[in-house]
Amino acid sequence: MKKINIKKVFPKFKLVGKRDWGEERLLVLIPKVLSLKLLLMKKGKKGNLQFHHKKNECGYLLSGKLKIKYDNGSGKLKTKVLTKGKYFYFPPGLVHQETALTDCKIIEASTPHFNDRVRVEKKYGLKEAKGLPSTTKKEVLLR
């Protein structure tokens, strides 16, 4: 039987980085396969309007009320409000933005492309907020 590093079986979370909207905790990273995160979004805060080149992302709302703006390919933003127990899936190319209507706790699972984002506020006539910059497809790293 292969010896397993117990620290990998029960890892400690790591903060991914400072976020204007709250806190992003990396719970588990399975290299080149999956990342599991806990997102703590503060009421009234929102992420960037963006899409991903390669990243597949899904989430489950543990608590709170979350507004999601998205473009299903029509060129227009639509809105859906999620409550506790609801979930979402953002495939590569889907424009999306999350806004916390109340304090929210979200479990997010995704491919481990940590720097994959294309900001699109200007395309939709919106003011670009603070946040992480866009990356090109060539810059996207799989951890």
Image (cartoon, rainbow, N blue to C red):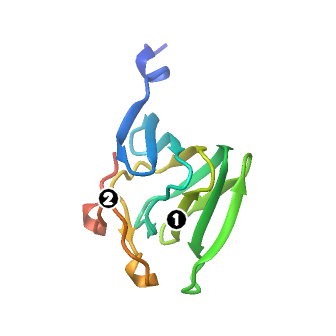
Is residue 91 among what the camera can see?
A: yes
Residue 108 drawn at (x, y percent): 55, 46
Which residue matches tag 2? Answer: 132
> Residue 44, located in which quarter of the rendered image?
bottom right
Q: Amino acid at mark 1?
A: Gln
Residue 115 drawn at (x, y percent): 33, 55
Residue 75 drawn at (x, y percent): 54, 86
Is residue 4 among what the camera can see?
A: no
Q: Which circle's residue, 2 or 1, is located before the other in the chain?
A: 1
Is label 2 in a helix, a strand or a loop?
Answer: loop
> Residue 133, located in which quarter of the rendered image?
bottom left
Within-10-Å neighbours for mark 1: few <14, some 14–19, many 20+ = some
Query: Residue at image x 38%, y 53%?
Result: 113
Label of residue 70 in the image: none
Q: Amino acid at mark 2?
A: Leu
Left or right placement of residue 28 versus residue 128 in this view? right
Badge 2 vs badge 1, beta-carbon distance below 8 Å: no
Label of residue 97 in the image: 1
Is the C terminus in the top left, top right, bottom left or bottom right quadrant?
top left
- As rendered, which of 55 and 32 lies closer to the eye? 55
- As rendered, which of 138 and 118 lies closer to the eye? 118
Q: How many marks?
A: 2
Left or right placement of residue 80 versus residue 26 in this view? right
Left or right placement of residue 78 versus residue 53 in this view? right
Query: Residue at image x 32%, y 58%?
Result: 132
Question: What's the distance in space between the residues labelled 2 and 1, CA to CA?
Answer: 14 Å
- Hey, which residue is sitting farthest left in the picture? 139
Within-10-Å neighbours for mark 2: few <14, some 14–19, many 20+ = some
> Residue 78, located in which quarter of the rendered image?
bottom right
Residue 2 drawn at (x, y percent): 45, 16
